[in-house]
Amino acid sequence: MSEEIAGLPTDRAKTISLTRGLARNTIFNLIGWVWPIGISIFSVPFIVKSLGNDAYGVFAIVSIAAGYLSLLNAPVEMGNVRFMAEAYAHGRWSDLREAMAAGLMISVAMSTLGSLTMFLTAEVLARKVFAIPPVLIPSSVTAFRLAALSFFINGVVGALQSIPIAMRRYDIRNQVGIVVGTLNTVAIVLALWRGWGLLGAVWAQVLSSVLGLVLFSIVGWLLLRKFPGSKRRSLVSATFVKRLAGFSSLLFAGRVAGTIGREIDRTLVGILLGTEAMTFYTVPTKITSYIPGMMSSFSTALYPLSSEAQATGKIDELRHLYHEMVRIQLWASALIAAVLIVLSKNFLMLWMGSAFMVNSWLVLAILAAGAVWQSSGIVAYQVCNGMGRADINLLGSIGTAVFLAIPVLILAPHWGSPGIAMGVFIGKFVSNLAYDLFTQRKLLGVKSWAESLMPYVRAILPAAITVVAFSLLSVHLAGWVGLFIKAGLVSCVYIGCSLITASIVVSDIKFVLGKLSRLFPRVRGQRVHI
């Protein structure tokens, strides 16, 4: 590791601003978000074509099962970040090492439980739960069992990557993530090119998980070894384990509800509509999931910052950061959603072909609109967890699950995939708006309704005007070049309307450009080598 890691501070002052390094970390998070999108654009058509609609549907179903099991170790990872960030803020290095060791120990136990659950229930999942074609059931059973192994490894990786996250080293986390994610996609493509089919693709994911385990183990060791007393053996006290387990248990309860809310749409598609419908639904879901993925990358830095704010009494500064993050995230997500809604038919036709355009364009448009409402909820989630208010997140997650499940269950039997997408839109609108308003008013002490609601109006109004304008104008441009030109036109109209509604101001644009111009020369001069 470079001198930058070797020179990590051993004395943390309470006067350090929460915004120090926030823009830098946010940009690195966004880089880690943009790169997989580019890879997916080129790889998904080949993967779907090579596997076929039914086998790709099975591939997606396996990921759903792993998503449900992730609720076992993800809360421990988040709780670990909170306690490590708090110890790092005060320079309590023994507490930092103890938190790391306790988190790793609990994550291994939870990952083992989840892995065994998936391995032992593979037959039931493939034959009884999901509507998988009989010819694919044997390979599906094996795929579930291989995914169980990958799940165990990824659980340990999650505990290890909490180390750079707690230290605000998102640059390191994203560099490793980009390497692992890229090699994972390359391995899947090579496996399919060699004709190894569904099981070859799942094996590629297992090997990528092993690579992630190796790299994050090295990163964690290099980061921790420079702190005072790092050569002493880290003993985990029962008191600290109980403290971490108690906080994580609240996160776990919320995670259960949140996972149900997040996965219920694809779960019902897999159970009610079959594997081919799963493919036609998963592809637009994969696209729109990048919107909350971007928002999460943009706001993840608020999690350890919130812990530091609570520990150092900087709540006013945190409140300002919260409002700015909600405003920016609503604006950015509405921009992406407007582009996707206007270009849904053209994009799917060029990218995946006519069958996907016919079966998936409406789902893509509805899900893109629904993703906008997630932006504020993501910010609330990070801040509540960082401040130790997992009880608020528990209520929010339960509300999300309820408000998603009810409309999805009502609309799915009548309207199929578009009905499920509409149910998701309704659920996200109600739950995330309530989540944000509750956090602002009850946790951060915001009194003004106008202050809380105006960011929504200022971001969504330009998006609505843009979509309606292009629907009435019917601008037709052929090919990929025409698609990019039209996307640029949509973006320009939206940005112009946003300046009018004050969703963004000119100083925001100047700030981003200035940070980018100063960031990358400094990054090149301080590159981290492993």
Image (cartoon, rainbow, N blue to C red):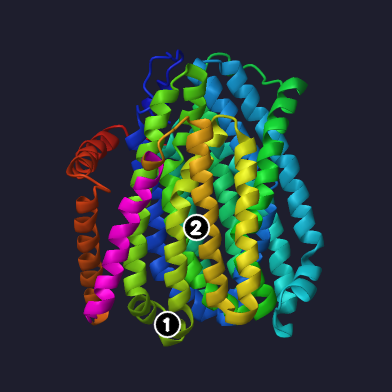
Give the CA distance from mark 1 to mark 2: 26 Å
* Image quarter of the N terminus: top left
Could you tell me residue 213's position as x and y percent?
Answer: 59, 45
Q: Is residue 18 left or right of residue 498?
A: right
Q: Where is residue 93 in the image (x, y as percent from the top left)?
A: 56, 17
Magenta span contains residue 351:
no
Q: Which of the 4 image quadrants contains residue 278?
A: bottom right
User: What residue is drawn where x is 34% and y is 52%?
Assistant: 457
Residue range corresponding to the magenta coloring: 451-477
Query: Residue 181: x, y in percent?
Result: 48, 55
In the rendered structure, find residue 429 and report the number of the disc placed on it: 2
- Residue shown at the point (65%, 47%) measured from the top left: 255
**Main secondary-structure element of the magenta-colored stretch:** helix
- Foreground: 4 or 454? 454
Residue named by callout 1: 357
Please, what is the three-letter code of the amino acid marked with disc 2? Answer: Phe
| Label 2 CA crowd tier, 10 Å (few <14, some 14–19, many 20+) | many
